[in-house]
Amino acid sequence: MSRIGVFICHCGENISRTVDVERVASQASLMAGVAFSTDYKYMCSDPGQTLVKKAIAEHNLTHVVVAACSPRMHERTFRKAAEQAGLNPYLCEMANIREHCSWVHENREEATQKAIEIVGMLIERVKKNRILPTITVPVTKRALVIGGGIAGIQAALDVADCGHQVVLVEREPSIGGHMAQLSETFPTLDCSQCIMTPKMVDLANHPNITLHTYSEIEQVDGYIGNFQVTIRKKARSVDEHKCTGCGICITKCPQKKIPNIFDCNIGMRTAIYVPFPQAVPNVPVIDRENCTMFKSGKCGVCQKVCGPGAIDFTQEDILITEPVGAIIVATGFELYTITEKAKGSPIKGYGEFGHGKIPDVIDGMTFERLASASGPTGGKILRPSDGKEPKQVVFIQCVGSRSREKGISYCSKVCCMYTAKHTMLYHHKVHDGQAYVFFMDARVPGKSYDEFWRRSIEEEEAVYIRGMVSRLYQKGDKIVVMGSDIAVGVQVEIEADLVVLATAVQPQKGADLLAQKLGISYDKYNFYSEAHAKLRPVECATAGIYLAGACQGPKDIPDTVSQASAAAAKVMALFSKDRLEREPIVARVKEATCVGCFACKKVCAYGAVEEKEIRDRQGNLLKVIAYVNPGVCAGCGTCQATCPSKSVELDGYTDEQIVAMIEAL
Amino acid sequence: MNPENKNRFEPKIIAFVCTWCTYAGADLAGTSRMQYPANVRVIKFPCTGRIDPVFIIKAFQQGADGILISGCHPGDCHYIAGNYHARRRFAAFRKLLEFIGVDLNRIQFSWVSAAEGGKWVDVVTDLTERVRNMGPMVEFKELALEEQWSGGLDSPDLQQVYEAI
Ligand SMILES: Cc1cc2nc3c(=O)[nH]c(=O)nc-3n(C[C@H](O)[C@H](O)[C@H](O)COP(=O)(O)OP(=O)(O)OC[C@H]3O[C@@H](n4cnc5c(N)ncnc54)[C@H](O)[C@@H]3O)c2cc1C
Ligand code: SF4
Ligand code: SF4
């Protein structure tokens, strides 16, 4: 038999002005199962809560209904009070007679009648409430960071500095990402390598960080606090432990004419290589496609010259498994290559800009490599075709970006700023040169950003032309750029020596495949989706997975670093407890009736439904049924309304509870 | 009740709403002290995805004259996609109700966000007035009675059904 206590709040006069609270209390006392009923001026106040607790003890109450404001206000308050008085908190319900009644109705009779009915519904509901134990899941206090650009490096360092173990997985032979390729960085023009490499070294030397470069994520199992990640360490052909990084192999390798992707294919590298001199780890990789040994079985020069005997042509990919509690995804971006039309891409290329055909039409990252002191030209701006110093350079912004017809409607966010930077770097290096910029708008919000952009015009003499380029073509050793200046309304034609295209920032190729392994969502461009655009910008909807950097959308370095530290803070909050506590509003499968149709699995947006084998004592498989992982379930109840055999039930919102409310009408 | 409305039909409206958007929107109507008819009774769910069509039938049986189902706008679901599942489910269910002869004007499906206190008021007021004009819903109430009944079969249709079983 339930002994329900009903507590009607006046809320000062907020409720009692329109609702006859005494009558509600006396009516409630007549309802079946009610053992005690009273009203009080401020139920949520200290004396009010004490009143509730005392009544629970004195009247041996089994359930509590507090009729007051919205449960969104004070459900927690009263459940806690009930818990302190020894009741399971989920045996306490609130009836909303303020927001849903006294405040929205003027007629005292109608409002009182409605309040009585609302209380009646909650009384019937609470009778069906069950004791729900708090659910806790263990937390493995190790984090996985995917991607070793500035986002991943920052996040890994933050988590590791807090004393937790971090595993960082980077696909390339070295960490660093795009920032390692940049020359100088806006808005301060400090040298990228100078601020980046110390962080890379810190990371490599950090006692709490395990670094797997030249590695990729193979498989992800588990859920928040308890992931199992399988990592494929690709065969490097060099033993990481034996290699001292002396680099003698690199100097002796006969294959010297392989375009270096790190230098945007302007510079060359050998078959055994590190992508750039400051690489971390400073351990070379053999590019098997171009190595003579792998191609024809002859050579092996590197092996002969390597003192510590680190070269191992027989090395194979290995799979390792790491248990982690949280995952930070920081896989960054890539630039769209705007040749005629990239294979398999829905995005139409810019054939009219001659990229890929005219050697002196380059993209922004290539310009960064030309301007970089450690780049293939030693920091001299020399054009790729003939190595001459260009005297007229045309920069074209928004190539790919903001163009619905071409397939990308978003703004790439960093191009206005880096183009302004490029004009400055160019002017610093080629004093008698002239930079022209074709642009649609200057989108330069950010601390010191507008000032920076203005400086490129006012001090560095860049000529900005508002309008798009319609066509460009090679004429002798010049590139004729034809466009319109819509501000003045005239056609312009510039004979340029070099053209730099600010191409769209796009997600990494295969970003969708990684997302599928992780079970996180992504938008139509393959940028990863945050749980809430404003209030949860660093969390994925999938619990325990966080986002940092350009993989979530185009971002500059300050924003990337902020988001990385924010993601790290989320991970640290998760790791602050040994067990993760969560509201026990989760779905449960009734094993006896589940027929294993997995309709629930199809509708669950969180991947909380797993398959469970039921076996007899001899181990024979009887059936495969659904199991809801309470660590992952978000408690929406969609599965329950979908299940054709009524075999899954959401605790706290069972059919019994809902039907009891309907029947109380 | 106003004296002039004494004999006016007061419909019972049941609202099945999600916690995150519509329940919060109704709360906002309260905090903004907006006014609407007192006929509606709210039943809260975590998500519209949890709302089983059976509840609608049950509510009609128990004397509801009109039903409102309301959740987060498409794309805003707190649980990613629960409201899409709900929308699909109710699209199919409406057909079924229509088939068994329920006037679909008694059922309203709407999206009310946590910021739309005014929309909540409009939706509830419109539905209440519409159902008031339609008069009481009797079909399912009679069914509910028949279900519990244990005496003679007095209606010829039922007699016929009984024979057929
Ligand atoms: C031409 C140009 C100039 C710029 N100049 C500036 C500037 O001056 N100032 C400024 O603030 N910003 C600038 N930016 C923006 C800056 O480059 C980005 O903000 C920054 O690089 C983003 O860092 P990230 O770590 O998110 O991504 P990335 O730098 O792209 O790093 C991602 C890393 O993840 C790795 N990775 C990818 N996929 C996987 C996978 N599946 N598994 C494992 N690892 C993976 C990649 O190899 C890479 O190392 C510029 C951008 C461009 C294009
Ligand atoms: S074996 Fe391959 S990597 Fe080594 S030196 Fe020869 S070509 Fe270069
Ligand atoms: S309640 Fe929602 S989140 Fe939980 S298992 Fe069911 S569908 Fe998935």
Image (spheres, coloured by chain):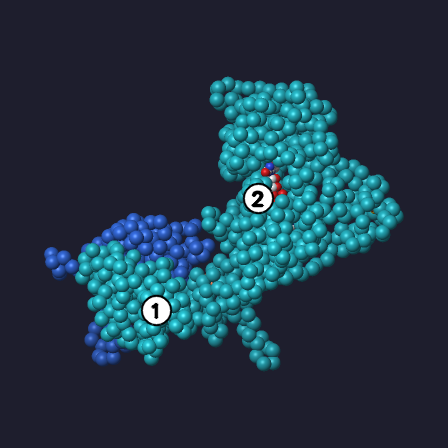
Chain colours: A cyan, B blue
Quarter occupied by residue A84? bottom left
- Label 1 chain ID: A
Task: Give the amino acid at mark 2.
Answer: Thr
* Pick the front one: A245 or B163: A245
Residue beneath the point at 87% across and 49% down: A307
Task: Give the amino acid at mark 1.
Answer: Thr
Residue A109 x/y as whole percent: 18, 61
Say if labels 1 and 2 share a chain: yes
- The answer as to whether callout 2 falls within 8 Å of ligand 1 is yes
- Residue A464 appears in view: yes
Q: First in sequence: mark 1 or mark 2?
A: 1
Residue A217 x/y as whole percent: 65, 54
Residue beneath the point at 37% across and 54% down: B21
Q: Which mark is residue A50?
A: 1
- Position of residue A195 relative to residue A307, above or below, is above
Q: Is residue A389 left or right of residue A412?
A: right
Q: Which mark is residue A560?
A: 2
- Label 2 chain ID: A
